[in-house]
Image: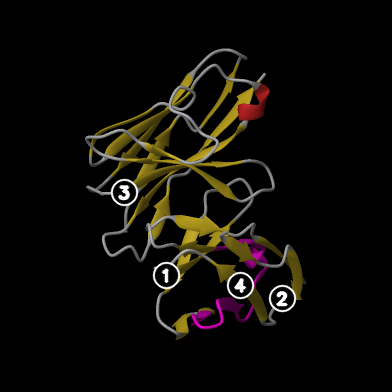
Amino acid sequence: GQNIDQPTEMTATEGAIVQINCTYQTSGFNGLFWYQQHAGEAPTFLSYNVLDGLEEKGRFSSFLSRSKGYSYLLLKELQMKDSASYLCAVMDSNYQLIWGAGTKLIIKP
Amino acid sequence: SAVISQKPSRDICQRGTSLTIQCQVDSQVTMMFWYRQQPGQSLTLIATANQGSEATYESGFVIDKFPISRPNLTFSTLTVSNMSPEDSSIYLCSVVGREFDEQYFGPGTRLTVT
């Protein structure tokens, strides 16, 4: 079956760095997405990885290892507004997204 | 990027009635999706809305309960039929970018069934 695993909840301190991991097993692979979702709002696209390596976008970076079925989202210089759920999703061979349950990130002052 | 709007943004409906949710995109897109997200949970794909043909439904979702229209490449509707309290959820419309490297979501429709 298809499966996406990510931690349920993480806590970090304002100004620090946090890494949110995602492992996956899917039927085919056409890319991995990370989304940010604030409570009561729709998900917002953060990043897309289809090749191995690190993609950096400002304070956010995303890494992919296809051989390991593994990705992480790295958030630097954490701000209180980064408190949100972070969703990992993999696009399978049918171009459909398989979603993880999301990681709730709590930022403390 | 694509800008997506949904109507209504929220509604409270009575059991047994139906609600149609509209999704409008500011550009032509090939693939449109309808998701459901229940409180505290991740997204569940209901169906893929195909232009000019019937929608493709995921396991557990049927056309009689969730009829979908896709009359053109910028618009789609999802109807939640014969509603029950279990249908209370956020319903999200989504589109995929041309290169399949981005996916955008509408603001969602928050449905409460009493």
Q: Which mark is residue B31?
A: 3
Query: Which one is closest to the eye, mark 1 or mark 2?
Result: 1
Residue density around tag 2, few if under 14, some if 14–19, many if 20 or more, within 10 Å = some
Which residue is labeled 4 in the image?
A23
Residue density around tag 1, few if under 14, some if 14–19, many if 20 or more, within 10 Å = many
Element carrying mark 3: loop
Query: Which one is closest to the eye, mark 2 or mark 4?
Result: 4
Element carrying mark 4: strand
Q: Tell me which residue sits at (61%, 14%) in the image.
A: B14
Which quadrant of the view contains residue B76? top left
Q: CA distance from mark 2 to mark 4?
A: 26 Å
Indicate the quadrant containing the C terminus of chain B: top left, top right, bottom left or bottom right: top right
Which quadrant of the view contains residue A19? bottom right
Which residue is labeled 1 in the image?
A31
Specify which label sits upstream in the sequence, 1 or 4: 4
Q: Are marks 1 and 4 in one subunit? A: yes
Amino acid found under the numbered disc labelled 3: Met
Element carrying mark 2: loop
Q: Tell me which residue sits at (62%, 81%) in the image.
A: A77
Q: Tell me which residue sits at (45%, 82%) in the image.
A: A55
Q: Are marks 2 and 3 in one subunit? A: no
Which residue is labeled 2 in the image?
A14
Tell whether position A84 is magenta: yes
Q: Is residue A57 above or below residue B91?
A: below
Is disc 1 in contact with disc 4, using a CB cutoff of under 8 Å? no
Q: Is residue B93 above or below residue A9?
A: above
In depth, the one of A23 and A33 nearer the eye is A23
Amino acid found under the numbered disc labelled 1: Gly
Specify which label sits upstream in the sequence, 2 or 4: 2
Amino acid found under the numbered disc labelled 2: Glu
